Amino acid sequence: MWVRAMELYGRLYRVVEPKRIRMNAALAQLQEKQAALAEAQEKLREVAEKLETLKKQYDEKLAQKEELRKKSEEMEVKLERAGLLVSGLAGEKARWEETVQGLEEDLGYLVGDCLLAAAFLSYMGPFLTNYRDEIVNQIWMKKIWELQVPCSPRFTFDNFLSNPTKVRDWNIQGLPSDAFSTENGIIVTRGNRWALMIDPQAQALKWIKNMEGNQGLQIIDLQMSDYLRILENAIQFGYPVLLQNVQEYLDPTLNPVLNKSVARIGGRLLMRIGDKEVEYNTNFRFYITTKLSNPHYSPETSAKTTIVNFAVKEQGLEAQLLGIVVRKERPELEEQKDSLVINIAAGKRKLKELEDEILRLLNEATGSLLEDVQLVNTLQTSKVTATEVTEQLETSETTEINIDLAREAYRPCAQRASVLFFVLNDMGRIDPMYQFSLDAYIGLFVLSIDKSHRSHKLEDRIDYLNEYHTYAVYRYTCRTLFERHKLLFSFQMCAKILETSGKLNMDEYNFFLRGGVVLDREGQMDNPCTSWLADAYWDNITELDKLTNFHGLMNSFEQYPRDWYLWYTNATPEKAMLPGEWENACNEMQRMLIVRSLRQDRVAFCVTSFIVSNLGSRFVEPPVLNMKLVMEDSTPRTPLVFILSPGVDPTSALLQLAEHTGMAQRFHVLSLGQGQAPIAARLLREGVIQGHWVFLANCHLSLSWMPNLDKLVEQLQVEDPHPSFRLWLSSSPHPDFPISILQASIKMTTEPPKVWCPQTAGANCAIWPRFLPASVHERPDRNDNTAF
């Protein structure tokens, strides 16, 4: 057993031992490898740790790179924005620096300028341009300098309280473009008190309607039964209100509105009108107009309102008439002009809005300007837009200059028409019934443009138009004038035309109107012809001698006393030769001055000859009134007014006209007087509907009802009366007759016309010299050519 066991053991040993040896070798090798593995794993761990560190560093570097890239992009954007800001504001810099410099300079004058502007707003409204300039420049500014109050040496009210963009908008809305009208517009819109506008030609009325038309303007007058209700609603909802056609007396109910009597109760603004409290809206605006050309308002009314004189001025009217004649003769020019005016105004308004937006964004910017994307984008957009607008403005203004040059060729027509209108307008100072509307005159001017002879040569066309319109004005006006005033009207037309063309010596003309007044007789030369020359006439000669072209006239009476006596006693001295060198030295006007000084009974003959020489004989031959033609010229909306003279009744002539035109059965006559007003109103209502002729005679006997008639006439302008309807009126001259009716009507005098000839002219000779000095006292202004 043992042997077998040993033998088995030996056999197994021989098998196992090599394996054990190999195992031990393998274990030894394993141990070596495990040691190497551990060493390698340690190295791997170290490498992994390094790799992790490198990865972290890599990620950090990538993050830094990304951050730097973003910063680089941001810096590029900021650099671009900075460039845009610099380039965008660079163009504004010079102008802003200039503006700042100007504002700093103006700041030093602010006290005096504000004082002048406040005084102008408060007191200058009623005055015309010459008085405004004199008061501001000769009185106020001198006093301010004496008191050492700093004020601008070239202060102008319109520049201080307005801007060109706003003024241009006003011009588009109908305000005349002259400086006087601009000042009025500022007073109306900037004054603390509501404006009461003296507006005989409805210039302010049109402007207010256009300016406030889109704001819900309410138009009322004191004859409306519900005007207070309309006013209360406007006050509550903030609508503008226009009270038109007021007289010299204002309804006391309006006092709270005029005084702006507003009380704050519980956070609400309330105004008491009568016995009713109305919530006051601060957007409410109140305008008042009157057609009275020379009203006399009480001190209380003047204190409650700002009275503004909107009487039309020659410069403003000339611009309007120029537009009319160019629109008729060269419509394409006027259309371009209108379009350019609107475009230029819109462009300048856009530039102002862009500038304001830039300044607002700069003012409101917080932090870095380079980070304000809206500012940069707005600035860039504004710059592009401003460049485009500026280029358009430059082109438009250049085009406007060229158009204005083309329009200027027609200015002589506009100037003549403007001058003639003011001659017409001045006739109201001679008789209160001589009132003419600007609208009617413009209609006459347009008619003259259409009917006057045409020519391919512009100079001839202008001459034809001026000649036609001048005589058209004469014919149009003569039917309105009493015979005794027609020569005066012709002479005034002639004188103003010559004055405008520079052919009239104004010192000589003023002497002709007023004569000589000797204030100091101590230095006066003795009268050498006391036997036949009255002292009053010698006074005229001594004063006439002071004029440049008459030096030596006094001495000639010593040199040629007999010749002067023969001239003085001549039946027609205006045709006789003057003594000595004076025959060749005097022109026609200067001869008239000598006649005016020595033979006032012959002045009318001189004037007649003067008019014939300068205008033609037809201007001293008034056309005979043709009532049929007058009626045909009228419309159902146009009243026809007879201006009565003593002892003349137009009723029979009007009845004959009615029979001739087939209106006798529809002709109604009513003599106004006490209790006749309701009947007159009924006749008018029926006549408008049924097409009657209504003749209201003797309106001067029912002056209290005239405001109601004025309202009825105003309603005719907006209604559609029967085509056959006509309203005939008659009245003796009276200052209280409604101006608006006179302006809207065709006026005729009832006295028979007189033909100017040597036999009849003498009837006016006595009138002329008496008429001159009377008006001298009424009109002391030496620059006013209507003094006679």
Image: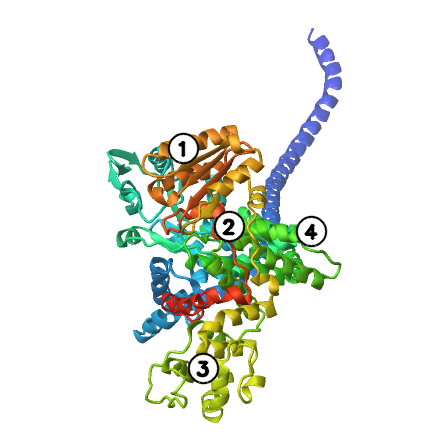
Numbered disc in front, either 2 or 3: 3
Q: Earlier in the sequence, mark 4 or mark 1?
A: 4
For the C terminus, the image quarter is: bottom left
Q: Earlier in the sequence, mark 1 or mark 3?
A: 3
Whether tag 2 and tag 3 are in contact, CB under 8 A, the answer is no
Does dot 3 land on a helix, a strand or a loop? Answer: helix
Picture quadrant where residue 82 is located: bottom right
**Residue type pointed to by label 1:** Ala
Q: Position of residue 84 (x, y in %)?
A: 60, 55
Q: Is residue 549 left or right of residue 227?
A: right
For the N terminus, the image quarter is: top right
Q: Which residue is mark 2?
A: 357
Q: Earlier in the sequence, mark 3 or mark 4?
A: 4
Whether tag 2 and tag 4 are in contact, CB under 8 A, the answer is no
- Between the C-alphas of marks 3 and 4, the distance is 53 Å
Q: Earlier in the sequence, mark 2 or mark 3?
A: 2
Q: Position of residue 69 (x, y in %)?
A: 62, 48
Does dot 1 land on a helix, a strand or a loop? Answer: helix
- Between the C-alphas of marks 2 and 3, the distance is 67 Å
Residue that appears at 60% across and 58% down: 471
**Residue type pointed to by label 4:** Glu
Q: Which residue is mark 4?
A: 332
Q: Which residue is mark 3?
A: 544
- Between the C-alphas of marks 2 and 4, the distance is 37 Å
Q: Which residue is mark 1?
A: 681
